[in-house]
Image: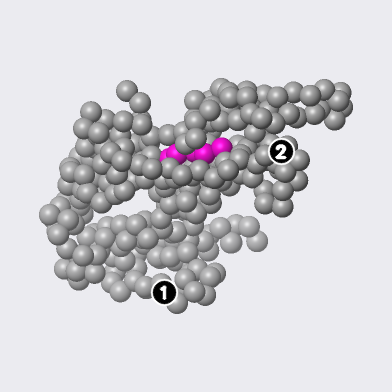
Amino acid sequence: MGWQQILVSLSIVLGDIHPSIDNLLYSTQTLTYTYSTFRSLMLNGTSSNGEFVVDPDLERLDADTYLIFLSGNGVVSSVPINDPWYRFDAISDFIITQVATNESVPAYQASEAASPLGCASQWQLCKGSIASNESCGPLTSFNDAWGGAAPLFGVETEATYTLWADELMKAYAADEDASRFLWLERMITNSQADIISIVNKLDSQSLESSRGLAGGLQGPLPDDQWKIDVSYWWNITLAVLQATFVERAYGSTNPDILRLQINATNAGQNSICQNQVREILKIYATST
């Protein structure tokens, strides 16, 4: 059963393809891949906010579901690409001439106007340095991971679903563990470290394959390139999370972001910042 069965209704409009290889290689507008992204989010075990409704046969109650449609957008390759997401196995109208041999070879293009990739995104939160069934919440969607782990920190699960972030902060301001947990949730939520946010922000540069793309011509790719791309997104996600903690303690270098930053107001929130400050100072002391 293919991912195309997930979408209830979706219309995709594509532009005209370039009419000649000369235009392809020497266009002032560099050809690159384009995306369409969609999210279906779970909240308290039911489908909540999102851009599409998942087919019941494919729905994951323990995960957020992402769809990422990849469009070739005029990009071609001198060799077929058998990766199941890229699928450059259709011969295009273009001919590529090898400079060294003067040999002409056909150019290959994507056989799918918009090739789908489906991802199930799960989070799990634990308390303490040792993960166990007793110290961890459920492995599930982003919202339900926070709700499920909340009791470990003295926060009622229902409160995480019914109260706004500011209301939660005020309700548990006197509880250091709860304040620390809720401050962490706010930091990570605002970091936009999920894969869809990264893909939308970086566009085609989020693809590891873009390193081999020049002038609309894609170099050879392995058959599992989609796995390499997803791993690349994951590495970026980890870097964004790491930067989030450093910026929270040290302050953003962007003045526009810095003026919007909300500082810690109680012991639980401040403890997260102090931990990061100590580590930053330790790194500086070690490197000097």
Q: Main secondary structure of the magenta part?
A: strand
* Residue 248 pos. (x, y %): 43, 65
Name which residue lies at 45% across and 59% down: 244
SS under mark 2: loop
Q: Name which quarter of the figure residue 33 lies in.
A: top right
Indicate the quadrant containing the N terminus: top left, top right, bottom left or bottom right. top left
Q: Look at the image and give the residue range highlighted in magenta.
A: 68-72
Asked whether, in this view, residue 255 is left or right of residue 53, the answer is right
Q: Going 29% across and 44% down the picture, which residue do you hit?
A: 52
User: Disc 2 vs disc 1: Cβ atoms closer than 8 Å?
Assistant: no
- Above or below, 82 against 274 in this view is above
At label 2, which amino acid type do we have? Ser
Q: Give whichever of 57, 171 is nearer the camera.
A: 57
On the image, numbered disc 2 is attached to which residue? 20
Question: Compared with residue 149, is residue 162 higher up or lower down, i.e. above or below?
Answer: below
Q: In the picture, which quadrant includes the C terminus?
A: bottom right
User: Which residue type does callout 1 highlight?
Assistant: Leu
* Residue at (27, 46) in percent of width and height: 41
| Position of residue 113 measured from the top left corner of the image (x, y, whole percent) | 49, 35
Circle nearer the N terminus (2, 1) = 2
Q: Position of residue 90 (x, y in %)?
A: 58, 24
Q: Could you say which is closer to the camera, residue 239 or residue 65?
A: 65
Where 125 falls versus 60 (above or below)?
Answer: below
Residue at 60%, 57% in the rendered image: 286
3 vs 32, left or right, is left
Residue 173 in view of the camera:
no
In which quarter of the view is residue 11 placed? top left
Front tag of 2 and 1: 2
Residue tagged 1? 260
- The disc placed on residue 201 is none
